Amino acid sequence: MEQVLIKSATLPKPCEYCGKEFKPERISAKFCSNACRTKAYRSRHGIPNPDFNKLVQKKPQREEERYLSFLQEELDALLLDEMNSEAKYKTAQNRYEQALDTYQSSLNHWSRENTQRRKKEVDQLRSELFDIQVKKTKLQKKIEDYQKYIDKEVLEKSQLIMSSDEIVNLKFETLDLGGDWQSLFGEPSTNFGMIIYGEANSGKSIFALRLANKVKDFGRVIYFAIDEKIGITIQKKILDNNIRGIDLSMAKNKREMEYVIKKGDYNFIFIDSASKVHITTQDLLDIKKKFPDKALITIFELSRAQDIFGAYNYTQFCDILIRIEKGKAYSRGKFAVDGEFQFL
């Protein structure tokens, strides 16, 4: 009987999913590949197959990532095999126990043969389950080791450590504004962060508009006129200071601002003012994080306690601080020594 079973296991049989003939490695094999086994499982449980049109649009994976994905797919297939094998083993174990009870109560020849057959089935399924679990353990260890290897490669290739010579040879794009602007805060990087602050009616908006008019030569400018809105006041400031070539917006929260910035692909972002709008320090940090290559210039109003109202810890993330007092700007920043500029 055992010889017949072993011989029949080597005969070709049709795959229960695709119908293609294959040569099974064991008697209980039903599918020609792990792919068919997974598809059959999805079909039985109503799980949709992946949309490969969408998968094609994904960012191409590195060779190491593709191999890791392949190993993970193999592990998923083994886990599915393990689950099915455990279910078959438990069923066979229950049948064996029932046959054993019948044999012990009747002690007839048929019951003994049935019990022996059930026992062989249980032993075979236990062996298959053990083999699957051994393969699963080895594959899990292989995936874990390979993930460590990838992490090590990424760490070695990353720029966590740079020599002083490498840093000296780096090229950074800066803004050469010239004249009083350069003497006020030097040559900032193109993605600088600035806070303009002062008391009410000290000239903060005029200073910001003139700066916007200057940096427009280096890229597109969006000016969020939240404080004064689009009205006669802002119109008068634009006319009096000959401001041309910048865009203005009345967006009043982070979501609207991000939409405007992304749609217009602006290089310089002015927010006038953050103290009078529902925008938090975290919102400003989020905008800066989402648009790291943009310059962000934010206006704040001094509180009665002479604190930058609403800025909280945001000042430590800025490159330049500009204090406005009665038409005069005082600077403190990373790109030049402290300076001052009488603009009114």
Image (cartoon, helix red, strand yellow):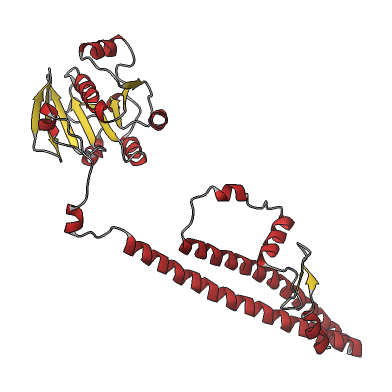
Q: Is residue 74 above or below residue 116?
A: above
On the image, the x and y values in percent for residue 244 come to 27, 17
State which quarter of the image contains the C terminus. top left
Question: In which quadrant will I find the N terminus?
Answer: bottom right
Residue 141 visible in the shown view: yes
Kindly tell me whether residue 310 is visible in this rendering.
Answer: no
Q: Position of residue 126 (x, y in %)?
A: 69, 80
Q: Is residue 20 left or right of residue 105?
A: left
* Quadrant housing residue 221: top left
**Percent position of residue 275, x then y:** 28, 26
- Front-lying residue, 40 or 109: 40
Pick whichever, 274 or 270, lies toward us: 270
Q: Is residue 15 above or below residue 172?
A: below
The reply, left or right, for residue 265 in relation to residue 73 is left
Q: Can you say whether 145 is above or below 158 in the image?
A: below
Q: Position of residue 183 (x, y in %)?
A: 9, 31
- Identify the image quadrant of residue 293: top left
The mark total stands at 0
Residue 277, relative to residue 12: is it above or below? above
Q: Residue at x 88, y 90 (%)?
A: 107
Residue at 55% over, 64% down: 70
